[in-house]
Amino acid sequence: QLQLVESGGGLVQPGGSLRLSCAASGFTLDRYDIGWFRQAPGKEREGVSCIRSGGGSTSYADSVKGRFTISRDNAKNTVYLQMNNLKPEDTANYYCAANDRLTVVRLCARWEYDYWGQGTQVTVSS
């Protein structure tokens, strides 16, 4: 059974850092596009950062460029989201998602992804 499990969320002060992990079971993660999405209360789920299968192209939301970095560790079957210089507006529930489509129109569009984790909460507050 294909499963994604996020971890690494928590409470951090503005300017701090967190590293989120997305661990996969039941499938080989490097054969899938992986995306990180977030959803704040009252807002739609939005794409934060995504990486193409095989570790090729990446995509970042404008609001996180230069602060967040997505990466893969194929040996651990895990994808990471390193988040630096966090801001209160980064507060949200963060989800990872996967798809195994041969082609995508928009790498970081929510509708491109078929498999979702349960999410991990990130709260940025002083």
Image (cartoon, rainbow, N blue to C red):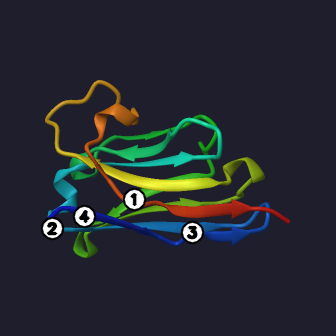
**Residue corresponding to mark 3:** 9
Q: Which mark is residue 26?
A: 2
The nearer-to-camera label among 4 and 1 is 4
Which residue: 16% across, 53% down?
A: 31
Quarter that holds the C terminus: bottom right
**SS for dot 4:** strand
Which residue: 25% across, 64% down?
A: 3
* Mark 3 neighbour density, 10 Å: few (under 14) some (14–19) many (20 or more): some
- When the figure is inspected, residue 85 is found, relative to residue 106, above or below; the finding is below
- Measured in 3D between alpha carbons, the distance from the residue under mark 3 to the one under mark 4, in whole angstroms, is 18 Å
**SS for dot 2:** loop
The nearer-to-camera label among 2 and 1 is 2
- Residue type highlighted by circle 3: Gly
Q: Quadrant of residue 57?
A: top left
- Of labels 4 and 1, earlier in sequence is 4
| Residue 46, percent from left and from top | 51, 38
Q: Which mark is residue 14?
A: none
**Residue corresponding to mark 1:** 71
**Residue corresponding to mark 4:** 3
- Of labels 3 and 2, earlier in sequence is 3
Point out the residue furthest to the front here.
Answer: 42
| Residue 71, percent from left and from top | 39, 59
- Is there CB contact under 8 Å for labels 3 and 4? no
- Is there CB contact under 8 Å for labels 3 and 1? no
* Mark 1 neighbour density, 10 Å: few (under 14) some (14–19) many (20 or more): some
- When the figure is inspected, residue 1 is found, relative to residue 31, above or below; the finding is below
**SS for dot 1:** strand
Which residue: 17% across, 44% down?
A: 100
- Of labels 3 and 4, earlier in sequence is 4
- Is there CB contact under 8 Å for labels 4 and 1? no
| Residue 4, percent from left and from top | 31, 63
- Measured in 3D between alpha carbons, the distance from the residue under mark 2 to the one under mark 1, in whole angstroms, is 20 Å
